[in-house]
Image (cartoon, helix red, strand yellow):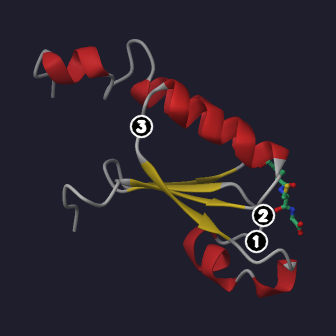
Amino acid sequence: MLCMSSPAITLYRLQACPFCERVVQKLEEYDLSYRSRFVEPLHSKRDAVKRESGARTVPVIVDERTGVTMSESANIVTYLENTYGEGGRLAPEAAAAGGS
Ligand SMILES: N[C@@H](CCC(=O)N[C@@H](CS)C(=O)NCC(=O)O)C(=O)O
């Protein structure tokens, strides 16, 4: 369930991971609040992320607003652009217009 104090977006990430930083940059560009979950550096111990996405690589994003769970940084960036970027279906101007 969503509530005001818990961000809709969770980012599974690793310190100093350039793929994760690409996603962070996009989230910040769109001023989206998100929660970071830092995964175990050891690949074999990444069960939490494997349960979410089916893979052990990060970044992984879980967006409770849309029900999307996704890995692969390039796909995540495209998803964020299409959803929250200019003209995106949940972009601020679409929300302000009361779009469905
Ligand atoms: N093609 C993936 C590459 C992601 C990737 O290689 N992430 C690293 C961390 S920077 C990882 O999780 N590698 C798996 C591993 O370390 O076993 C993407 O663009 O998201």
* SS category of the residue bearing label 3: loop
Decide which of tag 3 and tag 2 comes sooner along the chain.
3
**How far from the left and from the top, in percent, is residue 99?**
15, 22
* Disc 2 CB within 8 Å of nearest ligand 1 atom: yes
Looking at the rendered structure, the kind of residue marked 3 is Leu
Question: Which residue is at the front of the view, 63 or 32?
Answer: 32
**How far from the left and from the top, in percent, is residue 72?**
72, 48
Q: Answer yes or no: do the residues labelled 1 and 2 have beta carbons within 8 Å?
A: yes
* SS category of the residue bearing label 1: loop
**How far from the left and from the top, in percent, is residue 68?**
45, 52
Q: Which mark is residue 32?
A: 3
* SS category of the residue bearing label 2: loop
Q: CA distance from mark 3 to mark 2?
A: 23 Å
The residue labelled by disc 2 is: 57
Q: Residue at x 76, y 78 (%)?
A: 40
Quadrant of the image containing the C terminus: top left
Question: Which residue is at the front of the view, 63 or 17?
Answer: 17
- 17 lies left or right of 68: right
Q: Quadrant of residue 41?
A: bottom right
* Disc 1 CB within 8 Å of nearest ligand 1 atom: yes
The residue labelled by disc 1 is: 56
- 76 lies left or right of 82: right
**How far from the left and from the top, in percent, is residue 35?**
47, 58
Looking at the rendered structure, the kind of residue marked 2 is Thr
Q: Answer yes or no: do the residues labelled 3 and 2 have beta carbons within 8 Å?
A: no
- How many neighbours does mark 3 have within 10 angstroms: few (below 14), some (14-19), or many (20 or more)? some
Decide which of tag 3 and tag 1 comes sooner along the chain.
3
- 75 lies left or right of 7: right
Judged by depth in the image, the label closer to the viewer, 3 or 2, is: 3
Against 84, is 16 above or below?
Answer: below
Q: CA distance from mark 1 to mark 2?
A: 4 Å
Q: Residue at x 86, y 80 (%)?
A: 42
